[in-house]
Image (cartoon, rainbow, N blue to C red):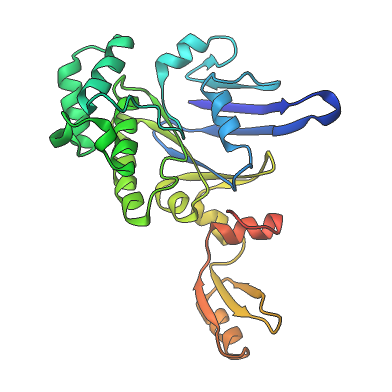
Amino acid sequence: MITVSELTRRYGAAEKQITAVDGISFTVEQGTVFGILGPNGAGKTTLIKMMTTLSRPDAGSCAIGGFDVAIDPLSIKKLIGVVPQENNLDRELTAYENLLIYGMLHHASDLPGKIERILKMVELWDRKNFVVSKFSGGMQRRLLIARALLTEPAVLFLDEPTIGLDPQIRRQLWDVIRKTRIDGRTVIITTHYIEEAELLCDRVCIVSKGKLIAIDSPENLKKTVGEYAVDVIGADGKLIQFMFKTRDEAHEKAKQLQNGVTIRRSNLEDVFMKLTGGKIE
């Protein structure tokens, strides 16, 4: 469904050029949730902008449904829906009016029926006549997703969909994102939240400083570092980690250490730290 090949984007003059995305390649199968995980500034949003025709690559290519984003952007736009980081809803209109105008601009058919179905799916039907400025942040993010689904896209792009939301609202939005896979829809999500990538994504690519450093299912990625971690605070106050394949091995190591030891399941941040030496923040 989606093929990204050596995609590259640079900014700035030649002597001070910054490579935001550096030769990234991957494929995404139809009907899957594909995560792009990395810290702020890793190049996630730049990558999404190229895949959604908002920015032209300096090198490489991206094809969605057989169409090249640089050669045939109009065909790409018919296939995709995009939920950007920034909230660009019309805050002076109601939820229903926002969807109605968007649907008319995109020549969507059966608008009343689609709006009702989608607003019910994101649990906003009872708020359809409320002005968006009165909505909470979580409600506005749900409405952004509803708007993107109005044209029934084959591929839905979500750029940091839960950023700035408190944990409880974030989990509610995860339920909405899970529902977007109806009818085999492909979902691409960028995030720097470890738990979000682990719970929502079938496959995850980890990016750092514009480069792809690992790609696989969350479970397979975690197995590369060991399934259990032992955390202990050293004499200098810094965290020391030990990784093990089994819980028994982790327990044996914990017995050798002083108090304040924690045994836990490994996560994708452990993978990131092993590969880069840094944290996902």
Image quadrant in which you'd find residue 236: bottom right
Relative to 39, residue 247 above or below: below
Query: Which residue appears at 28% of the width and 25% of the height?
Result: 92
Left/right placement of residue 218 relative to residue 4 reads left
Residue 188's x, y, as percent? 46, 35
Left/right placement of residue 217 relative to residue 147 reads right
Residue 178 visible in the shown view: no
Left/right placement of residue 216 relative to residue 61 reads left
Left/right placement of residue 238 relative to residue 49 reads right
Residue 50's x, y, as percent? 58, 24
Query: Which residue appears at 55% of the width and 47% of the height?
Result: 216
Q: Nearer the viewer, residue 113 or 182?
A: 113
Q: Nearer the viewer, residue 72 or 95?
A: 95
Residue 149 visible in the shown view: yes
Residue 185's x, y, as percent? 36, 30
Query: Which residue appears at 80% of the width and 23% of the height?
Result: 13
Residue 28's x, y, as percent? 50, 33
Q: Residue furthest right?
A: 15
Relative to 121, residue 70 above or below: above
